[in-house]
Amino acid sequence: MRHEERESKSNRFLVLPVPYEKTDITDTEDGSPNIPPQLGILPLRDVVVYPHMVSPLLVARKPSVKLIEDANHGSGLIALVAQRTQDAEYPHPEDLFKVGTVAKVMKVLQFPNNVMQIYVHAIARIRLVEFVESDAPYLVAGIEILNDRGMESDTELEALSRSVEDLLGKITTISEEVPDDLTVMARDMDPSATADMIAM
């Protein structure tokens, strides 16, 4: 299999829910991450990275490699957006979903043949507003942060959270692929992060 065919498909051995640390990037006054209005896009094939997750990705396509290089010389932030199909080797805007995540590149490992393995920490869910013209070889788009919708009451939220935790506990008892520790981790996470972890 060619490197280009492997991009973002393998090495899923590390998928962890990790709280966003304010020390990672400069924050706004309200404590939210200071995310620029436009970001370069890393198209993902056969994988979705949810907020709060740390995940490894293989990067081999030349525009994507350039994106990571530019990110390392800047804020380290990129947009992770899944492709609608795996067949698009160099996807156009219409080949991408409109919702993804903004992530910080935490570590880069360089392999032969200009292939990289990167570790990203997804910070927040975003929507692509519009694609912008750029001299860069990769896609760049204006983004907006998608905040979690508030529940009607704390009582409703607590009831749903307990229900999800109970279901997760049942899953861990019947599936050997789901570690028991996930149930313990879910108890200490906010409901949004728990939902994203289960979706993984």
Image (cartoon, grey):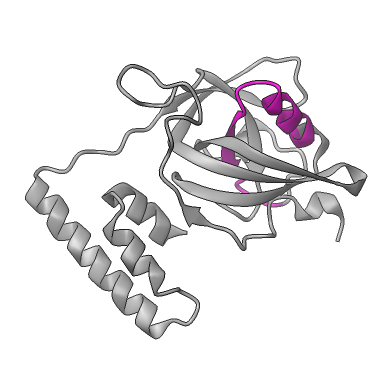
Q: Position of residue 158 (x, y in %)?
A: 14, 55
Q: Which residue is drawn at 45% across and 44% down?
A: 51
Q: Is residue 75 magenta?
A: yes
Q: Is residue 81 left or right of residue 175?
A: right
Q: Which residue is drawn at 87% across and 55% down?
A: 2
Q: Which residue is drawn at 42% across and 30% down?
A: 22
Q: Which residue is drawn at 50% across and 18% down?
A: 37
Q: Position of residue 141 (x, y in %)?
A: 58, 23
Q: Which of 69 and 24 is in front in this view?
A: 24
Q: Nearer the viewer, residue 150 or 82?
A: 150
In the image, residue 54 sits, relative to residue 24, either above or below, namely below
The answer to whether residue 50 is seen in the rendering is no
Count of numbered tags: 0
The answer to whether residue 146 is seen in the rendering is yes
Q: In which quadrant is the N terminus drawn?
A: bottom right
Q: Position of residue 4 (x, y in %)?
A: 82, 49
Question: Bounds of the magenta span?
Answer: 64-86
Residue sitting at the far front: 23
Q: Is residue 122 left or right of residue 194?
A: right
Q: In this view, does 108 lie to the left or right of 25?
A: right
In the image, residue 14 sits, relative to residue 115, either above or below, namely below
Q: In which quarter of the image is residue 90?
A: top right
In the image, residue 175 sits, relative to residue 128, either above or below, namely below
Q: Does the magenta stretch include residue 174?
A: no
Q: Quadrant of residue 107?
A: top right
Q: Is residue 80 left or right of residue 149?
A: right
